[in-house]
Image (cartoon, rainbow, N blue to C red):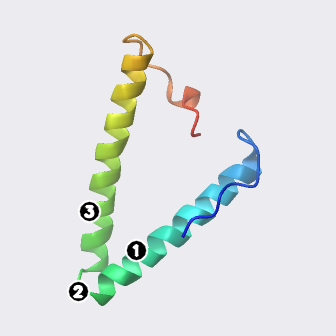
């Protein structure tokens, strides 16, 4: 469902490519969920909740790996 990146990390083209991949994946998930009976807003809200929880886990792991030092958001390798 998701193609691998074609651009090197740190380029604006890679960010565009990632945004397009995520938008497509979310669109497919929302359409599938809607077809089986979930409301679009209901489902998207659940995606936001799940994403927030996952991001909190990643931030906690990153903080632990940095020895308790919280890294600035721009320092994360996925940006």
Q: Where is residue 30 in the image (x, y as percent from the top left)?
A: 38, 76
Q: Which residue appears at 31% of the width and 78% of the height?
A: 40
Q: Helix or strand or loop: what does disc 2 sit on?
A: loop
Q: In this view, does 50 lie to the left or right of 58?
A: left
Q: Residue 46 carries which label?
A: 3
Sequence-wise, which precedes: disc 1 or disc 3? 1
Residue 3 point in image, percent of width and height: 63, 63
Say which quarter of the image contains residue 39: bottom left
For label 1, the crowd category at 10 Å Cα-Cα, with few meaning under 14, some 14 to 19 and many 20 or more, is: some
Q: How crowded is mark 3: few (under 14 residues within 10 Å), some or many (20 or more)?
A: few
Q: Is residue 70 above or below residue 2?
A: above
Residue lying at 31% horizontally and 80% vertically, measured from the top left: 33
Q: In which quarter of the image is residue 38?
A: bottom left
Describe the element under mark 3 as helix, strand or loop: helix
Residue to which mark 2 is pinned:
37
User: Which quadrant is home to the N terminus?
Assistant: bottom right
Residue at numbered disc 1: 29
User: Could you tell which of marks 2 and 1 lies nearer the N-terminus?
Assistant: 1
């Amino acid at each position: 469902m998701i193609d691998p990146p074609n651009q090197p990390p740190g380029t604006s083209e890679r960010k565009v490519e990632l945004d397009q991949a995520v938008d497509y994946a979310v669109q497919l998930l929302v359409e599938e969920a809607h077809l089986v009976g979930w409301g679009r807003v209901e489902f998207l809200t659940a995606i936001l909740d799940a994403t927030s929880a996952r991001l909190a886990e990643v931030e906690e792991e990153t903080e632990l790996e940095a020895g308790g030092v919280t890294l600035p958001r721009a320092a994360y390798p996925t940006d």
